[in-house]
Amino acid sequence: MNFDFLFIVTYGRSGSTLLQGVLNTIPGVLIRGENAGALHGLVGSWQAIKIAQDLFSAESDKSTSPWFGAADMDLDSYGQDLAASFIRNILKPPPDIRTTGFKEIRYHMAADELAFEMEFMRRFFPRSAFLINTRDLEDTIESNIRAGHDVSEEDLIAVDQMLRSTAKSSANDVFHIHYDEYRHDLDRLGPLFDFIGAHIDRATLQNVLDTKHSG
């Protein structure tokens, strides 16, 4: 496997649960489902400490400073502990798992916030990759309405544009996969499996594609 962590970055009703199932056909891979954006909070906490250090470290060694101790905060150790706790308590990979991760649809954020979150994940989840999952927007919007998801059409359009822009980056740890391209043609999954460094088990994979995921 080329990566130790795989993160599906997407939006609701995009076929991401099916992609989750596809990845879980790979021996040694365990991709969890959504966690209601739990990692966002951890990244925000780490970002707050980084801001405190970047802006207020000067003279923070003095007990009279309102930011007393800011320079002594261990930013790397804190980030490592946050990531380790997330892996241990949320992902909980068994000993035989080589690659783990999760999928999340809650990325209604500004592009710079997404970029920062991805940098945190790159820094504290070694050998990680981001699978940007998209779907035809009209179908996604219709599916959101049918499912009763409280996400506006404007928000879906914005997050789709943001993720497609992210997918166009030259980063070698980002892969763009489109639901409509592989849903009825498992051969279209070949490049994804090559990117991950995994072998396609056609029979198992076809069974997953034929099985209804989500609702």
Image (cartoon, rainbow, N blue to C red):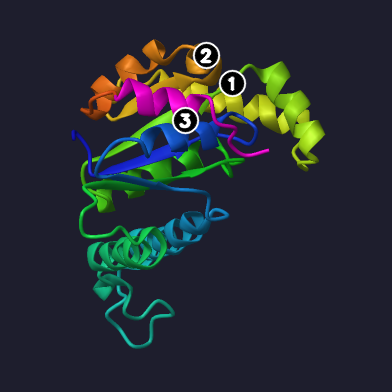
Tell me the magenta residue range: 201-215
In the drawing, does residue 76 fall left or right of residue 111? left
Q: Tell me where residue 136 sits by quadrant.
A: top right
Q: Residue at x 23, y 28 (%)?
A: 198
Give the secondary structure at mark 2: loop
Q: Which residue is mark 2?
A: 184
Amino acid type for the residue under numbered disc 1: Arg
Tell me the crowding category of disc 3: few under 14, some 14 to 19, or many 20 or more residues within 10 angstroms, Cα based.
some
From what the image shows, is residue 68 above or below residue 95? Answer: below
Q: Amino acid at mark 2?
A: His
Q: Nearer the viewer, residue 118 or 57?
A: 118
Query: Is 18 on the left or on the right of 127, as rendered?
Result: right
Of the image marks 3 and 2, the number of the one nearer the N terminus: 2
Check disc 3 and report the residue beneath it.
208
Picture quadrant of residue 65 = bottom left
| Disc assigned to residue 158 | none
Mark 3 residue type: Val
Residue at coordinates 46% horizontally, 11% vertically from top-left?
Answer: 185
Give x and y (percent) for residue 24.
Answer: 37, 39
Residue 77 at x, y = what percent?
A: 23, 67
Camera-side residue of 136 and 124: 136
Residue 211 falls inside the magenta stretch: yes
Q: Earlier in the sequence, mark 3 or mark 1?
A: 1
14 with respect to 163 (left or right) = right
